[in-house]
Image (cartoon, coloured by chain):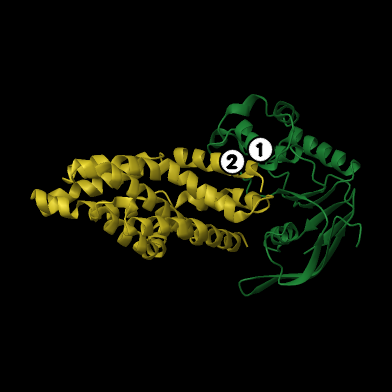
Chain colours: A green, B yellow
Amino acid sequence: MSSALVSATGLAAIRGERVLFKDISITVDAGQAWLLRGANGAGKTTLLRILAGLTQAETGSIERNTSVHWCAHRLGLKPNETPRLHLANWTRAWGSSAELVDVLGRMGLRRPADVPARYLSAGQRQRTALARLLLEHRPLWLMDEPFSALDVKGRAMLLDLVARHRAQGGAVIAAIHGEADFAATGEVDL
Amino acid sequence: MKPAPLAAAFTQSLGEAWSGGAGAVLPVGFFAGAAMLVPFGVGHDNDVLARIGPGVLWVALALSSLVTMERLFQSDLEDGALDLWLQIDAPMAAIAAVKALAFWLAAGLPLTLITPLLGLMLQMPADTLLPAALGYGVGGIAFFMWGGVGAALTASVRRGGLLIALIALPLYVPTAIFGAMALQSDAGLLAPEGLYLVATSLFASAVAPFAMAAALRLAAD
């Protein structure tokens, strides 16, 4: 048994008739941050879904030794949910003991905390989804374009979150298009 | 199995059912409208109405239970909540069942509660209205469970509403048969036909959740 949080070898994915990628291997240890790189449609999201266990890989094997936080492009936020309601709901579902007021404050969501998601800006919605990361400690974060809708302050905040998470022995795998702001351990090219 | 994830899934779905499709108003309006057309269609012969009334209500109930089904899982798939539910530390079948139950509470229960009123309009004898409502309530659970299977199978299909009807309506047949027979017998739900009606709902509640879970995993893949 390896000490890696997640380790995958020889992954391949097929979408329709097309081979998205093949022979992808990745091993993520505590404290690391890996970036997934590739053009649009290269299969970054699919690889993340495979690593999360949501999609079956065509070939290859995955060994996951830890729980995962899933931060996808689809945020998981209901139009009628306020940030407070959304986080309270997942606090309950996960049985976590996080203080909602603290979490909302740390994510800069105190003011829009009671506004339904359909009236929130894209950045505020993204912050709400990212706030789930604080509800419960899970060593591995899988993130799909986590910076896309965030403003300067939001980016800094997320970078800070990731840095703290890595310092506590967590790891991150993120699909990011722009420049990588955090010190990445390595990149996976698709 | 921990109850907390199920409670969270229930409240989330209940909130969605009320906000998304105006809750019970749409199915109840559809139900009342469909039942109201019958006296106009078949004429005002009280005996005829009383004879076909219970069956007409079964048909109308079956159709109106499908009205909100399209949103049961489709919204979860679209907004990404399904991915989160699939990763949760609870059986997906239980989560799916609880979600269908939340939709039943939002739409199925109001439909059941309005059946005595519609029965009165269809000249059903007054003393049969409440036992009949109980029968419609029990049968409604089977309708919502099988409807949930259709909703899960069509979650990734745009405008899958009619497809849900095609999948679910054949599965409604046993419930409709035993439901209509139970309402004809004097003993109601306690007659053998009534017990078979209860059995179809229990069977649906036991089997449909696993079908929903399997279909949802496929939809997310």
Mark 1 touches mark 2? (CB < 8 Å):
yes
Q: Point out which mark residue B7 bears.
A: 2
Q: Secondary structure at mark 2?
A: helix
| Residue plotted at (20% across, 51% down) | B53
Circle 2 residues within 10 Å: few <14, some 14–19, many ≥20: some
Image coordinates for residue B35, horizontal then vertical, percent: 23, 48
Which residue is outermost to the top? A111
Q: Quadrant of the C terminus of chain B?
A: bottom right
| Residue A156 figure quarter | top right
Could you tell me the amino acid type at mark 2? Answer: Ala
SS of the residue under disc 1: helix
Across and down, in percent, residue A96 comes to 73, 37
From this view, report whether residue B104 is shown above or below residue A19: above
Residue B95, horizontal then vertical, whole percent? 58, 50
Left or right of A176 on screen, residue B91: left
Chain of the residue on which disc 2 is drawn: B
Assess disc 1: are there few (<14), some (14-19) or many (≥20) residues with their C-alpha within 10 Å of its C-alpha. Answer: some
Q: What separation in Å lies between label 1 and label 2 (alpha carbons)?
A: 8 Å
Q: Which mark is residue A92?
A: 1
- Which residue reaches farthest bottom? A17
